[in-house]
Amino acid sequence: MPGQMFVRFMLLQKRLLKKGGFLLMLCLAPLLSAGVGRLAAESAGIATIALYLPEGDASAREISERLLNGGGVLRYLPCDDEAEAQILVETGEADAAWIFSEDLSERLEELGEKRRVRPVVTVVERRDSVPLILGREILSSAIYPSFSYKVYEGYVRDELGLAGMTDEELRRVYDSVAVEGSLFQMVYPDETPGETEEFTYVQAPLRGILAIWFTFVGLSAALWFMRDEDRGVYGRLSVTKRLSASYVAGAVYLLDAAAVLLLSCRLAGVFTDWKREGISCAVFAVCVLAFANLLRMICRTPRRLGMVFLPLLAAMLALCPVFLNLPYFKAGKLLLPPWYYLQSIHNPRYLYEMAVYTAVLAALGVILQRVQSRRR
Amino acid sequence: MGRTAAYFLAQLKRAARLLPGQLLADIAVCFCAGVFACLLIAQGALAAEGTRYRIGMVGDLSDSYLGFGIAAVQKMDDSRFMIELVSMSEQEAETAWRRGEVYAVMRVPEGLMESIVYGENDKLVTYTAAQGQQGLGTMVMGEITDVASTLVTCSQSAIYAMQRVLADQGRGEEIGRETDKLNLALINLVLSRSGFGEVEVLGYGDGLSLELYYFCGMILLFLLLSGLLNSALFVHGNGAFSCFLKARGVGALRQILGEYLAYLLLVLAGLLVLCLPLGFGLVRGHLGIPEWEGMGAAPFLAFVPVLFPVAAMFASLQFFLFEAGDGIVNGILLQLICGIGMGYLSGLFYPSAFFPEKMRVLGACLPSGAAVRFAQAGALGKIPAAAWAAVFVWLAVFLGLTTLVRWRRMQ
């Protein structure tokens, strides 16, 4: 029996790989992943900021370094003058302009001495928005290191009465005790630190897109099986053995797709490690197989199954954490295999839940198969 | 010509048989999309009120400085417009996180304040934000924590430097008093840090509002992926029948035209079904689109015909993919990967402005990019000739390619 299944598996594999359309479809996923992975290396941001900082000003240089070399979710367009920055906003090439005052260092020094916050930047925005609110926080945090230094300088000279201390002495003391590094660290539920994965938000949805694609490969395999059934390819098999035959047919599709999924994740830059990816992908493949087969048996005809595809896709896009992670419809999420897969990458608990869900789907498939074969 | 018309009518009858089932599936999609849109709007409304990220705080919160810091963030700091800190037990936080009631769980280690006061900074506040892998939200959250970290470490540096100066001057007894004074001054400055920028809002509106952008985006995505819904039409594709038709004088081009027009009508029927709840939502004011505010359904009724050329272009793309996929199974998978891939690159999920320059150019060159430009221009009431040309060129290209594939298959 296992030998027969293996022969059937290999024959189906041979038949599938002869199809140009199937190979084209398999090639498109890595192509998309590699393309986005490569293009994502370029500068991008959720808001574009036209940046004008006065030339030759020490504080301006420090702020500019913090903003331009810090990575982050904003994109900066350095400008030569104030007018250029303003024009970029007016023409819509930038969402906002940050125009620093010409006498930035003197202004910060004056404010530091007085320990007061007053405008040193003109922020010109087309329209207020959430990314620009975040942008203003980033702007404040870029100014704050220079400003807090000026506060310290002013405090020592005025409040402590040490006006005689030179700039160099003050700087030396400050540098000797300066605190660096972040106080926060993002960790995944499996304790993996967030910074171990270096990809941008442009690449982030690719795993989700690939997971949905993989689910549809499973559904297409079910459709393929139904067509073969209609053509009488499985005419010699008894109705009760059809379920295992459909699993074999689905496994042929999903084996190729699983290899492409892993390769695509790697090309997209969202790959973690082989062990974790391999286990998650294997459980996901079995889950998709059981899910597609159950749906096949519920829909019963290729036409009905085809009509389920778009609503199912809409549900997956809305409920799985692909582009957004909405905190609603937990019950709906629990029905979708990609949701488990996407969660399981950094949380083993979901891997077990996916395995349990797979067992439930497979059991339901067996029951439904028996009910349907009795009716025939 | 007569045979082409007869073939078209035969295809039309086939499409009409699919229509009831397709309408049901359309309604299901509309329901999903409607619920999704309502949730997005609800989330947007929350952002406007300022509670975007709800964060559960667990761990050692007993320190009075820390308590003051959390209270300050909650009540006085500008960040209260972006985050909401909720103190909870580990168990409560875990449950809330799994239910999606909190965006992240922040764990404060024991002795954090001592570590900060003594400048060691060896205890890190860890946060578990991402469900699955990191996404845009987690990265934004990372920016917020970076801001908080910079504010704390720079204030620390200023205080320690001042303490060192006093110690070097032999005025150790003053350190406590001066530290308190400088601390208070810095806290005050941190809380008023938004005053560094003088904000000037131009209020320009020549582009689309985010609401109208996503309104157009969702309709286009529906059209782009509607090939999946109409896949049933291609279930019984038969190469031998094409050859038979050719022998009867209906060549590849005529076959494609007959089938394509019937298919297009199916796509347009789906579009109209989608437009009904959208129009209703607009009239009742459930969809707050600033550009169309207070104008009732009139702008939307003018917008619907704008979508017809786009629907025709997407229908030709889907038709080509089914033909090139050589069968419904591969056709569906091609539809899916092309639809989602093109939609993503052309900014139907995230605004294209979020992407790098080259990716934006690529997205704009794709058929979906041409559709986005056309629909967005149509929504504002002025479609440039270039947008018309791009849509019709793609339409012609796909019909030409489909004919070529059919012709080659018949040879």
Image (spheres, coloured by chain):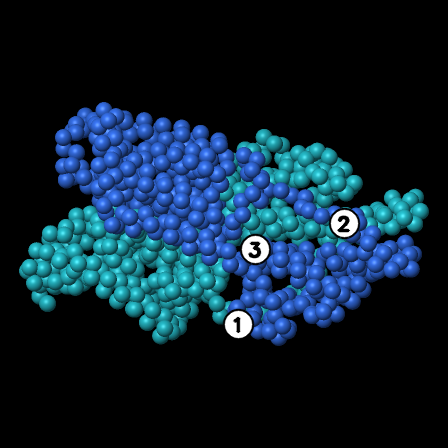
Chain colours: A blue, B cyan
Q: Amino acid at mark 3?
A: Val
Q: Position of residue B56 (x, y in %)?
A: 61, 39
**Residue appearing at x 32%, y 47% in the figure:** A26
Mark 3 secondary-structure assignment = loop
**Residue appearing at x 72%, y 56% in the figure:** A144
Q: Earlier in the sequence, mark 2 or mark 1?
A: 1
Answer left or right for A9 relative to B32: left
Residue A178: mark: 2
Q: Give the quarter of the image for residue B303.
A: bottom left
> Whole-Å distance between the Cαs marked 3 and 1?
22 Å
> Whole-Å distance between the Cαs marked 2 and 1?
42 Å
Report the residue marked by disc 3. A73
Seen from the viewer's position, the closer of residues A77 and A261 is A261
Q: Are marks 3 and 1 on the same chain?
A: yes
Chain letter for mark 3 = A
Q: Residue furthest left?
A: B248
